């Protein structure tokens, strides 16, 4: 197995695309299935054991909410 290189990408989606991805993620979590998503040309396989969190950041001129999905390889 080859090692994967480090990656830090932020991909912007239309409202419709974002909603569709959230629905697929929610369905996978609810049914206990692995979640698959393609981001910037790379297919990512999220295992069932992944942990989910929500992060809120606030700065002087903007706020951000991140829905995070994390797992160990």
Image (cartoon, rainbow, N blue to C red):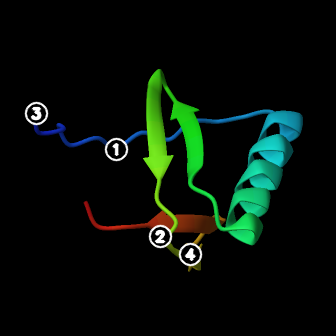
Q: Earlier in the sequence, mark 3 or mark 4?
A: 3
Give the number of the mark in front: 1 or 4.
4
- Residue under pointer 3: 2
Q: Quadrant of residue 37?
A: top right
Q: Earlier in the sequence, mark 1 or mark 3?
A: 3
Q: Earlier in the sequence, mark 3 or mark 2?
A: 3
Mark 1 residue element: loop
Report the Cα–Cα distance between label 3 and label 2: 22 Å
Give the number of the mark in front: 3 or 4.
3
Percent x, y of residue 2: 10, 33
Q: Tell me if label 2 and label 4 are in contact, CB under 8 Å.
A: yes
- Residue under pointer 4: 52
Left/right of residue 8 with respect to residue 13 in the rendered view = left
Q: Residue furthest left?
A: 2
Which residue is at a point 77% across and 62% down the rendered structure image?
A: 26
Report the Cα–Cα distance between label 3 and label 4: 27 Å
Q: Which mark is residue 50?
A: 2
């Amino acid at each position: 197995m080859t090692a994967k290189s480090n990656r830090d990408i932020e991909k912007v989606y239309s409202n419709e695309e974002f909603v569709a991805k959230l629905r697929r993620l929610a369905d996978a979590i609810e049914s206990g299935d692995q979640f698959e998503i393609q981001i910037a040309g790379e297919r990512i396989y999220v295992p069932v054991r992944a942990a989910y969190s929500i992060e809120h950041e606030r700065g002087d001129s903007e706020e951000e909410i991140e829905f995070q999905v994390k797992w160990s390889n």
